[in-house]
Amino acid sequence: MDQYQVITLDLRNHGLSPHGDDFNYKWMSEDVLETLSDLGLDKVYLLGHSMGGKAAGYIALKHPHRIKKLVIIDIAPKSYPPHHTLYFKVMRSMDFGVITNRIQADQWMQKDIPEVAIRQFLLKNLVRDDQGRFKWRFNLEALYQHYDEINVPLIAETPYHEPTLFIRGALSNYITGSDETLIHALFTNAEITTIEDAGHWVHADQPDKLKKAVVDFLKFSSI
C-alpha cells in the first residue's frame, strides 16, 4: 500500500502494547482513539481482522466521526460460541520450568492440538524473558478471564453509514450468509466480498488478493 501511510497497532494485552487486567472492546476502542489523537490523526481508514475487526466495528459504531471507511476481515458483528477453550487450556498448562525450546513446546501442544498451522500460530507468541525462560507475549490470563467479553455481539443505537467492506475467506465459517442481514443493519453502506482459497487467516493465505480488495475499496468506493 505504497500510496497510504499504514500504522499497525497491537491491541492491549497483545504484542508490545501494555498489559492490564481490563480487556473488552470499550478499552480497546479507547486505546486506539487515544493513539490516533496522540498522532494527530483526526479521521482515518480503519482495518481489523478477527477480534481486531470487531474492535474496529465497535469504534466505527461508537465514534463514526473518526472513521472515513471501515474494513473488517473475517468476523461478523455477532456473538460466537466459545471455541478457544482448548487452546487456553493447553497454553495455561504449559510448564515453562520444563520446556526449554520450541520443539518441546510444540510437542507439548501436539497431543491436544493436532493442526500444525494452529500450533505454529500460537507458538509465534512464545518469547523469552530477561532470564531466558519462555513466556507468552500476550497477556494470557487477561484474555482467558475476559474471553466472554470478547464473544459479545456489537450493538448500537445508530448504525454506521460510511463505506464498509467485510472480507471473508471462502474456506472460513466466521461470516455466513445468515450474517448478512445483521451486517447491513449495523453497517448500512457495507459490501461483502469473498477471497477464494483463504481460510480465517486471509492475510496469510492470500495476501495479494486481500491487498487488492482493500486498495480497490479505498480507491473506488463512494464516500
Image (cartoon, rainbow, N blue to C red):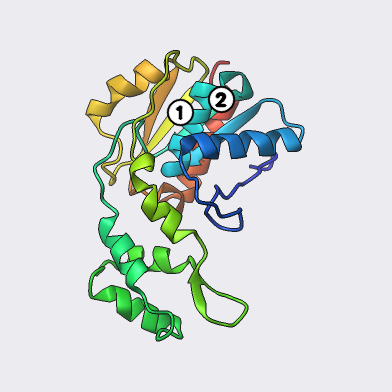
Residue 4 seen in the current view: no
Total numbered circles: 2
Q: Check disc 1 and give the amino acid type.
A: Leu
Q: Is residue 185 left or right of residue 22?
A: left
Q: Is residue 152 left or right of residue 165?
A: left
Q: Secondary structure at mark 2?
A: strand
**Residue, x 45% and y 13% (percent of image)?**
158
Tell me, for residue 35, which label it has, or none: none
Tell me, for residue 69, which label it has, or none: 2
Residue 169 lies, with reference to residue 109, above or below; the image says: above
Question: Where does residue 69 sit, x and y in percent of width and height?
Answer: 56, 25
Quarter occupied by the C terminus: top right
**Residue, x 46% and y 40% (percent of image)?**
24
Question: Where does residue 215 sit, x and y in percent of width and height?
Answer: 56, 34
Q: Are marks 2 and 1 in contact (CB under 8 Å)?
A: yes
Q: Check disc 2 and give the amino acid type.
A: Lys
Q: What residue is shown with label 1? A: 165
Q: Residue furthest right?
A: 40
Residue 12 lies, with reference to residue 193, above or below; the image says: below
Local packing at callout 1 (Cα closer than 10 Å; few below 14, some 14-19, many 20+) is many
The numbered mark, 2 or 1, whose residue comes first in the sequence reads 2
**Residue, x 68% and y 39% (percent of image)?**
35
Q: In the picture, residue 29 is in which quadrant?
A: top right
Residue 159 lies, with reference to residue 219, above or below; the image says: above
Distance between mark 2 and mark 1 Cα atoms? 8 Å
